[in-house]
Image: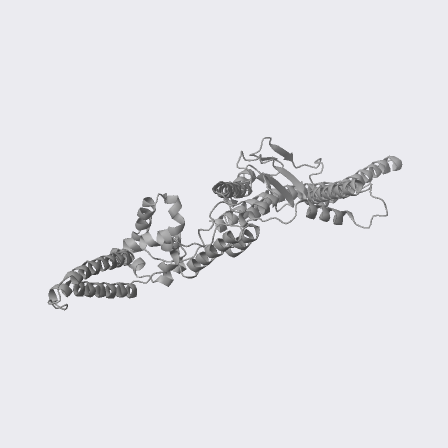
Amino acid sequence: MGTEAEALLLEVGAEMGRTEEDMRPFIRKIVEENWLETRESLAALSNEQWKQLGIPLRLETALRARLNPAAAAAAAAAAAAPAAAAAAAAAEGSSQRAAAAPEEERPQSESPGTPRVLSLPAQQQQQQQQQQQQQQQLLLQQEFTVEKGEAPEALFVCSIEDALDLLQRKVLGEDLKAAIRVLQQLLLGVLAQPANPKKRKVRIGNPTFHAAVRFVRSALPPSAAEARAAEAREIERQIKEREKLLATGGGGEPPPLNPQVFTLEQMRQLDKQQQQQQQQQQQQQQQQQQDDWGDVGGHAALTPAELMRIKDALGEGPSFQSRAKQQLLLLQKRKVFRVCCVRLLLPDLFVLQLQFAPSQTLRHVRDTAAQGLGLGFGAGTQRRLAGGPGLLSRQRSDQTRGGLNMQQQQQQQQQQQQQRQQQQQQQQQREQPRASGGQPPAADEQQQQQQQQQQQQQQQQQQQNSSHSVASFGCKKEINQLQQTLD
């Protein structure tokens, strides 16, 4: 359910032509961050507290008018009071002139101080004094605040003083220079005292200001201002598109998972190959730059980097760039990553590599990896990793190529050597009875020992196969722990 303050902000925004999405930042700042949820809490804010909120002046004025309509009416009356006072003064002057004419035509027998003639001006004076006192009381009760906002850099590329000084240097004619100086004084006076109505008035019959009023080349015509505003809007649109592109990586179809399994050694070799390729590319670029500058003779006193710096300085030169333009240039220099490579180290010292989009969440990565690991890691079975365009299968056996680590290869070599030694011993034992012409009494014991050794070897192989199933169980256990931490 929305609060009173949120409903009030949405109503005021609708009156100004703003949507709910446009008012959402102000709702977050006022209601969620500062806990101003009721109309009473907003009405109790002081001028300094309104300034600390940092909302637009138009929105602040509308909110304060909604929260305190009596104060808004008083402010409107105070603004209309000077006009009423001027009208009353004009009426008083006309009445005094009208009263002075009959006094001149009146005979001397009549006394000039009769109450019939002076009663009307005295009443007007009392009314004026009462109006002035009411205005002063209103000014004391109602505090007027004036806030200065920063001018958009796309329209105003320099300060008022610098612009007027530049215009004065380029304009021909002493009269026009004097008019520009008067205009500068008026603008500076308004900026110094924005609440003073006297600073906002210009006498119509000012000969200095009206000596020469016309367009000059240095002035900024309306078409140029509109062009700058359109350029600023275009830059803002490009900034939003670039930020979205950096966050999502393009926003197209997600890349294929492309599941791959490596050993630690294979992964290190791949990383080394990638680093070597990057170094070779950098060396080729440097070599190409040196070849481009190879035509310069040995008598040249400047290096290629210095020549490029001089060329840039002479070609473009210093130019003004707004804050939005600088932000766009920085965003354009950043790389856009469309694929994110994720590697999972399994307990059996194998590495599972998957590809995801940069915008994918950690939960999606975890679920996808859990699906791939849960499709069967049994002993001596075919491992399958689902989710990609092609299923990758790998069978663990004694004849796997590149799928075993160094320790397993050494164990295989030792087993092969033991088998060879046993075969040689069996051949020697078979040849000895033939040479002696009979069977030795210890032949049965040797056969029993050989059978025991074969049984031990079979048990070792079974233990190795069972270790793979234990490793797969360890993978699932780690995934469950990761899921609990994320939840």
Q: Which of the two residues, 164 or 296, is positioned nearer the viewer here?
A: 164
Q: In this view, does 404 lie above or below 93?
A: above
Give the left or right position of residue 219, taking residue 267 as reference: left
Visible residue check, residue 360: no
Residue at 32 percent of width and 52 percent of height:
62
Residue 247 rendering spot, x and y as whole percentages = 53, 43
Total numbered labels placed on residues in the image: 0
Residue at 49 percent of width and 40 percent of height:
223
Q: In this view, does 208 lie above or below 293?
A: below
Colour scheme shown: one colour
Give the left or right position of residue 441, taking residue 54 as reference: right
Q: Which of the two residues, 41 or 121, is positioned nearer the viewer here?
A: 121
Residue 24 rendering spot, x and y as whole percentages = 39, 48
Give the left or right position of residue 425, taking residue 261 as reference: right
Residue 396 rendering spot, x and y as whole percentages = 66, 37
Q: Is residue 58 above or below residue 360?
A: below
Q: Which of the two residues, 393 or 329, is positioned nearer the viewer here?
A: 329
Q: Which of the two residues, 476 or 351, is positioned nearer the viewer here?
A: 351
Q: In which quarter of the image is residue 437?
A: top right
Visible residue check, residue 132: yes
Give the left or right position of residue 277, taking residue 241 as reference: right
Residue placed farthest to the right in the image? Answer: 435
